Image (cartoon, rainbow, N blue to C red):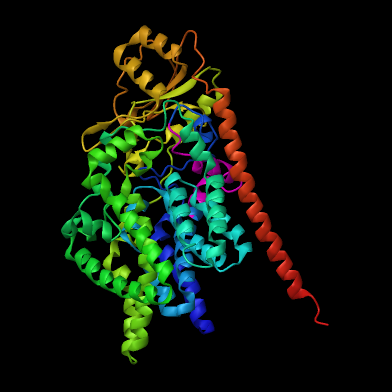
């Protein structure tokens, strides 16, 4: 590969990221569904994993809370979004770099520019996208480890740690790492698999231990499976949607182009090229290609299971601790994206090599830009669906008022619903930012209403508060809230009526769209986690942190040693 080609390959993933994220770089915060960023996130009980809510924000929220002490929150969000997509493409290109520039460019295009990325970005699943970005790098390090380069363990560990920013991402990372060890020296395979498994458990320990230690077990409502199952998209049907790296349950985040014949054309053309590329891959790296074919099959099976067998999957998530990870099974489509992108790149390079100029050049350019042509509405923040906004002054005023109060207990936010669609966010739905914005332990309703059906949450404390709101009013409500450890209440008036009679509370502050109350009378202590639970989760954080820091230290040490050797005078 020429120097010019190397420069183009290096820049291409970042150009793709810029095409997607350019409008997101304006001042403000991008708030969409589960993507909630606030200025100066504060670590709370739920952030560590020992609060009353199921630890879905472990470890992502703690990492944000740490880094936004150094980098302002809105800048940190932009760095994460641009960096995740750029590094995803760079890692994908690295997987096929030795096959030439066409292969590297094509694999980067398909891995970055696809329905999975579009739908998860619009749905606000930034931790999952960070994990998605780590998968190619995990495979790069895994290949080196398989080749006998044992120092590659540090790069592999760092990749697994990055993938573990979300629970599903951590699982995906471990599966890719284990699959990467197919082939190689059979005598060392057991040792390599043991290392991968051990490191994988260590870096995923925070969410894993927090979930298993959750009171009552980390199970979820079986009704969720039917609502979170794969959905048909346009002419593709359920199976076609998943095979083309889509199928998300929320139709509101599906790009419009997926409901046109273009999506079917994409499934056919990309599918044919991927099949050709997989045959080439099998011919050169049979064990690796066969192993990733199996991994892709696993991802597709999990993605379709909630639609095909909702009762069976519903039973699993309701009875198996931690199996709630598969209720939104289309997140596992990422296991198909990695090998499909590799196969696409290999085939694109082979086709271009076999054609004579100028057909070769035309075929190469077409392969590289074809994923973009099939999904044009991923560009520019999902065709303008995403844009930064500023929190109203009322939110800052209310936060200052809360910090000036001398009250006991937790904060309660009303209306008691999980999602909002405020006018100041352009009417876009977003998970209530109050739980993060106000910097204090906050009780948020974790029930969900999807397509008109209630999916019960797992937070017993929130359920008790919801019952008090429904069954009492006035002075009785104040007494019941105090008994449940609620010391203050914020009412978001722009989100609808409070849904409760607050006559028994004392109003202490009012702004254009937020009212602040305190609960009079004695306030009981909010639910406290058991000492054993806190200790177990704390040890898990220490294990994950120590493992990650050891890997970073080893990488730095090796880089410094390499630099010292390069600078040493030649005798």
Q: Looking at this rendering, what residue extends furthest in the right direction?
A: 571
- Which residue is located at x 41 percent, y 46 percent? 389
Residue 539: image quadrant is top right
Q: Quadrant of the C terminus?
A: bottom right
- Horizontal side, residue 128 vs residue 224: left or right: right
Vertical comparison of 263 with 365: above or below: above
Residue farthest toward the front in the current orientation of the protein: 187
- Name which residue lies at 34% across and 54% down: 299
Range drawn in magenta: 54-78
Q: Percent position (x, y) of residue 444? A: 40, 28
Judged left or right of residue 427, residue 516 is: right
Residue 111 magenta:
no
Tell me if I can see residue 256 in this picture.
no
Q: Quadrant of residue 196?
A: bottom right
Residue 553 pos. (x, y %): 68, 55
**Can you give x and y, in whole percent of width and height, for residue 552 in the image?**
64, 55
In the picture shown, does residue 467 fall above or below 444? above
- Residue drawn at x 34%, y 30% is 457
Q: Is residue 304 above or below residue 471?
A: below
Q: Is residue 60 magenta?
A: yes
């Amino acid at each position: 590969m020429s120097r010019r080609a190397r420069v183009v390959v290096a820049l291409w993933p970042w150009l793709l990221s810029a095409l997607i994220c350019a409008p997101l770089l304006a001042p403000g915060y991008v708030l969409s569904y589960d993507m909630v960023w606030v200025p100066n996130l504060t670590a709370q009980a739920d952030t560590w994993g020992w609060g009353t809510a199921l630890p879905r924000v472990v470890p992502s929220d703690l990492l944000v809370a740490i880094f936004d002490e150094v980098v302002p929150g809105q800048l940190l969000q932009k760095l994460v979004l641009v960096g995740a997509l750029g590094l995803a493409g760079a890692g994908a290109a690295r997987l096929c770099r030795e096959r030439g520039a066409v292969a590297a460019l094509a694999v980067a295009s398909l891995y970055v520019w696809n329905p999975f990325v579009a739908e998860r970005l619009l749905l606000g699943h930034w931790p999952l996208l960070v994990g998605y970005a780590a998968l190619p790098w995990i495979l790069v390090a895994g290949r080196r480890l398989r080749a006998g380069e044992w120092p590659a363990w540090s790069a592999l560990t760092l990749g697994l740690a990055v993938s573990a920013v979300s629970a599903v991402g951590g699982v995906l990372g471990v599966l890719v790492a284990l699959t990467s060890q197919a082939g190689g020296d059979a005598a060392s395979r057991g040792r390599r698999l043991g290392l991968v498994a051990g490191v994988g458990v260590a870096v995923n320990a925070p969410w894993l231990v927090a979930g298993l230690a959750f009171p009552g077990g980390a199970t979820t409502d079986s009704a969720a499976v039917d609502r979170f199952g794969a959905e048909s998209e346009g002419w593709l049907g359920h199976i076609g949607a998943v095979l083309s790296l889509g199928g998300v349950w929320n139709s509101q985040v599906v790009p419009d182009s997926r409901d046109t014949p273009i999506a079917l054309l994409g499934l056919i053309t990309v599918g044919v090229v991927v099949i050709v590329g997989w045959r080439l891959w099998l011919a050169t790296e049979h064990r690796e290609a066969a192993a990733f074919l199996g991994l892709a099959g696993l991802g597709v099976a999990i993605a379709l299971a909630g639609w095909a067998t909702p009762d069976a999957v519903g039973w699993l998530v309701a009875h198996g601790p931690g199996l709630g990870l598969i209720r939104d099974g289309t997140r596992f489509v990422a296991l198909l994206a990695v090998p499909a992108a590799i196969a696409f790149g290999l085939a694109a390079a082979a086709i271009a090599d076999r054609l004579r100029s100028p057909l070769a050049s035309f075929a190469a350019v077409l392969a590289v830009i074809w994923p973009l042509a099939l999904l044009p509405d991923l560009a520019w923040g999902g065709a303008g669906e995403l844009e930064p906004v500023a929190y109203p002054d009322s939110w800052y005023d209310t936060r200052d008022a809360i910090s000036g109060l001398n009250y006991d207990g937790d904060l309660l936010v009303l209306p008691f619903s999980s999602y909002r669609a405020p006018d100041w966010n352009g009417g876009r739905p977003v998970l209530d930012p109050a739980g993060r914005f106000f910097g204090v332990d906050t009780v948020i309703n974790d029930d969900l209403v999807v397509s008109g059906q209630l999916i019960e949450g797992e937070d017993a404390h929130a359920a008790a508060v919801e019952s008090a709101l429904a069954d009492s009013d006035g002075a009785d409500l104040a007494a019941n809230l105090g008994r449940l450890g609620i010391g203050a209440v914020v009412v978001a008036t722009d989100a609808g009526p409070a849904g409760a009679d607050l006559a028994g509370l004392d109003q202490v502050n009012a702004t254009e769209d937020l009212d602040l109350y305190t609960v009079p009378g004695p306030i009981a202590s909010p639910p406290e986690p058991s000492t054993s639970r806190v200790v177990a989760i704390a040890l898990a954080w220490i294990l994950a942190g120590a493992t990650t820091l050891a890997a970073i230290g080893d990488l730095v040490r090796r880089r410094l040693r390499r630099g010292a050797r390069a600078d040493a005078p030649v005798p």
